[in-house]
Amino acid sequence: MATALSEEELDNEDYYSLLNVRREASSEELKAAYRRLCMLYHPDKHRDPELKSQAERLFNLVHQAYEVLSDPQTRAIYDIYGKRGLEMEGWEVVERRRTPAEIREEFERLQREREERRLQQRTNPKGTISVGIDATDLFDRYEEEYEDVSGSGFPQIEINKMHISQSIEAPLTATDTAILSGSLSTQNGNGGGSINFALRRVTSAKGWGELEFGAGDLQGPLFGLKLFRNLTPRCFVTTNCALQFSSRGIRPGLTTVLARNLDKNTVGYLQWRWGIQSAMNTSIVRDTKTSHFTVALQLGIPHSFALISYQHKFQDDDQTRVKGSLKAGFFGTVVEYGAERKISRHSVLGATVSVGVPQGVSLKVKELEKQRESTATDILQKKQEAEAAVRLMQESVRRIIEAEESRMGLIIVNAWYGKFVNDKSKKSEKVKVIDVTVPLQCLVKDSKLILTEASKAGLPGFYDPCVGEEKNLKVLYQFRGVLHQVMALDNEALRIPKQSHRIDTDG
């Protein structure tokens, strides 16, 4: 007898991906995919108790997906709001003849009631630690004057500054968020700290506003107002007004930034700052998968300068980056170069050398803002489920391979899924790629393999070996006796065989 599925199983499965159908699939396509998977996972086809149990679980999951997608109302709810929408209390009293628009209105009402009943308080911690090291003695020593001083043969390297900052966020309502932040700084024996509290409200889909209150031992109380607004789909503006109270009186300040997306990876900024250190600044920032480039020009009091910087992003597991910049202005010229590397899941270590105006070496450890990843227990459970599905596929795959070989059709030689690493990476990192040869061969029908535009982690026999990281699917296959190879992104639709995948053996 079919057993009910747990909430965790429902949350971790994509029904369209599970059935391997398009989101626009017709009822006939859904029925054909459902029948095929039912034949594969039917519990009565397996005598081994463990395989029978796994087959029953997968059979029930496929049945659940088909029940949702075959019903027009539940499919409309799922398409708009996903599985969470189906779990919303109150659908049982909703008239089944309602249109998608009426369903949307009803869902929003139920969602508001649910949010009022259970308001989740979650924090979003972010932090930075920066240590400044004065290494001037490495480059500019005074050996002639101090040659008789004991210990003068060794360069003097000292820590001359340190900065620590931390912030947390707490949602108060669906539109209101409280932000608490603080910082401590010291330089050449002098230091101080500050604490800030802000309230942010999302006023519409196009903008938000924020009130800020702060105080510190180096500066007096601070009151600020910040506004953000999308003017067009490609242009936005931010305005920040502040009042700084000190022993010298009230010092007002105003900063306005106008930004526009010049293309997919490039943004242009115009900034005007009035008050303390008034200035006008224009900059262009281009950020791609492998590089980050900035060029800026500022005219202001007391500093006017031109800046150009470049950062190269290596596509490795440690997210290594090297960077360099040139800054020239009334104060002189400064050249900086450095690198940073990921040292843990949430931390990055970076070092920068400044030449021109002696500033030493800056080491920064930054807390990465990242969503919580699945625990090792969850990944292990998914792995066990995928392995069970592969065992259930073995007999079907054997028959598929025999049929394909008889007509020189599509044979999956090898297939891997996950985050690919180079040979220089650590050996432990290679477990991020899993073998999916059997699951892909099981999806072959009439010498064709078609995967829809969705994450492949939801396919039968697959699981996510590296949650939260970029993944690919690499397939080596044989068609008409000729080897082919293709590499596809995780969410990219894939259709094989193709002539463009053919491996050129002439070279």
Image: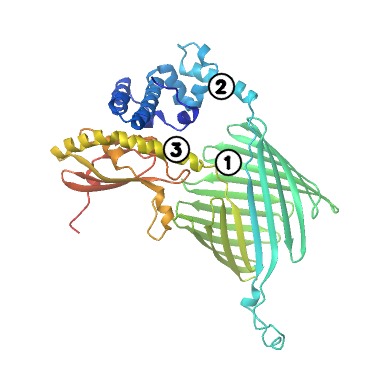
The quarter of the image holding the N terminus is top left
Where is residue 308 drawn, in percent x and y? 54, 61
User: Is 292 in front, or is 144?
Assistant: 144
Of residues 245 and 322, the one nearer the viewer is: 322
What SS does tag 2 mark? helix
Which residue is labeled 3 in the image? 381
User: Dot 2 surroundings within 10 Å: few (below 14), some, or many (20 or more)?
Assistant: few
> Does residue 95 sit above or below 264 in this rendering?
above
Question: Which of the two discs, 2 and 1, labels the residue nearer the N terminus?
Answer: 2
Relative to 288, is 396 on the left or the right? left
- The residue where tag 1 is placed is 236
> Of the residues under marks 3 and 2, which one precedes in the sequence?
2
Please identify the quarter of the rendering in which residue 259 is found: top right
Q: CA distance from mark 3 to mark 2?
A: 34 Å
- At x 68% / y 83%, what residue is drawn? 152
Spatial distance from mark 1 to mark 3, Cα to Cα? 44 Å
Please, what secondary structure does the residue beneath circle 3 have? helix
